[in-house]
């Protein structure tokens, strides 16, 4: 009887989530995201292209040259590079390895083109929301700079209930996709590759994350600024190796990406079974869910830095560019150049039981790396999945903590941390298909209140950008702004 009721409840919950997910990640939401990116790109004269040298110098360039001064004594903040690494830690997850492969399998090579387009315009959505986070922020009881989408929704839009709703969705998303789903990926990867028991993995990972959380945003920033470059450079080097070994196929792959991005079923799409609608929808959705531009999530980490608003916005551009235009692109090219993916076979199997039997997700990416690097390629993907998922756990732990503090006060932070750590263990020993789907829906619901505020406050974004470039004494790009 109990099992029957549990199955009935699970089925009902899945049905409700399916309906809500269609709204959260439906065409209207994707169109709104695209429109926001287009508005801020045009409104700033395509800032991401026209001022590429500037935002590169002001972000990674300043960090590498040691010029960044985002962390000042007594501010309680972190550097812009540390905040960006924390944000990248949350976005550089399993989606960069498994999600891209899934997008190609479901939408064809053309999905990669639309992923690029969504990321190109998404850079300016990231710029806009992070700039606003620099304008609307304060300090908590410890004197640490705090901010996030909830602050500019409440103070800028004047709508506290919408800010509370955003925080609620953020908390649920942090416990679901940011916590249990990532922990499950770590446990599965270690069990499959090294035969490590999931419970042991859960306890060790919970201990590591707990140690990091005890140090607050400073410790999170210190760890992610070392972990993120290490795992990104390692994965990039391996992916580039796969691509270079198959360099003869690069022109053919680029041609197929561009051709299938615009071919309807009557043309090449008819030969492969993919339509431009499939490529567009899957590509845009993959890009958005990977780089999180428009979700308002990365804003929570970047608001902890003391950078001037426009420079903070530049970090938003940098994060989207690294996540999608670099990491996702490398995964896509490695898969397509290696030859392990056959568009005719995959498209013919869409919607059938045969499709489930084809390599997909991380397995497809592993096949691509294994084709060049041998068994070590599969091992490298397993290790990368663990590192990427662990970094996501760190990033989302901070996101959820800030949302809890806003919604319930600082007294609720410790209970939230304990719940977050417990969910890591639960996630390692539980099947989480429905949890992943539900948390993905809540992440999608974060888009609506966030973009509503960002679009409403667009005059401030354009005005702040104009003042930055036309002031007689332009602010030092590496100097902290007063809080």
Image (tube, rainbow, N blue to C red):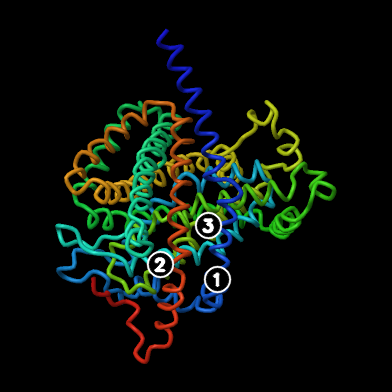
In the picture, residue 26 is in which quadrant?
top right
Label 1: how many Cα within 10 Å (few below 14, some 14–19, many 20+):
many
Q: Is residue 4 above or below residue 73?
A: above
Give the mark, 2 or 3, whose residue is nearer the N terminus.
2
* Number of the label disc, if any, that sits on residue 41: 1
* Number of the label disc, if any, that sits on residue 315: 2
Residue 443 at what x, y percent from top left? 44, 46
In the picture, residue 360 is in which quadrant?
top right
* Number of the label disc, if any, that sits on residue 324: 3
Residue ID at (38%, 52%): 162
- Between 268 and 168, which is closer to the camera in this rendering? 168
Name the residue furthest top: 1
* Number of the label disc, if any, that sits on residue 313: none
Q: CA distance from mark 2 to mark 1?
A: 16 Å
Residue ID at (66%, 58%): 247
- Between 5 and 173, which is closer to the camera in this rendering? 5
Label 2: how many Cα within 10 Å (few below 14, some 14–19, many 20+):
many
């Amino acid at each position: 009887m109990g099992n029957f009721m549990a199955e009935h409840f699970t089925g009902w919950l899945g049905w409700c989530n399916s309906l809500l997910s269609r709204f959260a990640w439906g065409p209207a939401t994707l169109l709104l995201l695209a429109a926001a990116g287009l508005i801020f790109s045009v409104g700033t004269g395509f800032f991401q292209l026209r001022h590429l040298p500037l935002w590169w110098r002001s972000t990674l360039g300043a960090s590498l040259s040691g010029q960044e001064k985002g962390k000042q004594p007594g501010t309680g903040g972190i550097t812009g590079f540390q905040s960006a690494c924390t944000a990248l830690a949350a976005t550089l997850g399993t989606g960069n390895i498994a999600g891209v492969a899934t997008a190609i399998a479901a939408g064809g090579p053309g999905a990669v083109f639309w992923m690029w387009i969504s990321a190109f315009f998404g850079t300016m959505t990231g710029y806009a929301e992070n700039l606003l986070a620099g304008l609307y922020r304060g300090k908590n009881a410890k004197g640490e700079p705090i901010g996030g989408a909830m602050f500019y929704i409440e103070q800028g839009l004047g709508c506290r209930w919408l800010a509370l709703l955003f925080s609620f969705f953020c908390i649920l998303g942090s416990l679901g996709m940011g916590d249990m789903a990532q922990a499950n990926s770590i446990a599965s990867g270690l069990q499959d590759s090294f035969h490590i028991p999931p419970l042991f993995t859960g306890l060790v990972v919970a201990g590591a994350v707990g140690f990091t959380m005890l140090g607050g945003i400073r410790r999170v920033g210190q760890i992610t600024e070392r972990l993120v470059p290490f795992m990104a450079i390692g994965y990039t080097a391996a992916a580039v190796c796969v691509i270079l070994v198959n360099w003869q196929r690069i022109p053919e792959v680029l041609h197929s990406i561009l051709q299938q991005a615009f071919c309807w079923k009557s043309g090449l799409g008819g030969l492969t079974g993919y339509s431009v609608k499939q490529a567009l929808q899957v590509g845009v959705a993959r890009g958005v869910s990977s780089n999180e531009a428009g979700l308002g999530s990365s804003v929570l980490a970047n608001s902890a830095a003391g950078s001037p608003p426009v420079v903070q916005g530049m970090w938003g551009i940098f994060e989207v560019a690294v996540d999608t235009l670099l990491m996702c692109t490398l995964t896509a090219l490695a898969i397509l150049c290696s030859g392990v993916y056959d568009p005719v076979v995959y498209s013919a199997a869409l919607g059938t039981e045969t499709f489930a039997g084809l390599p997909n997700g991380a397995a497809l990416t592993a096949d691509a790396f294994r084709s060049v690097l041998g068994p070590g390629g599969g091992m490298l993907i397993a290790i990368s999945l663990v590192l990427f998922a662990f970094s996501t756990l760190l990033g989302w732990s901070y996101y959820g903590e800030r949302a809890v503090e806003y919604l319930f006060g600082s007294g609720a932070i410790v209970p939230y941390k304990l719940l977050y750590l417990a969910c890591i263990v639960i996630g390692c020993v539980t099947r989480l298909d429905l949890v992943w789907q539900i948390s993905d829906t809540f992440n999608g619901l974060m888009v609506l209140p966030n973009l509503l505020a960002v679009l409403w406050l667009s005059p401030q974004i354009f005005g702040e950008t104009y003042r930055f470039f036309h002031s007689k004494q332009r602010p030092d790009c590496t100097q902290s702004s007063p809080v």
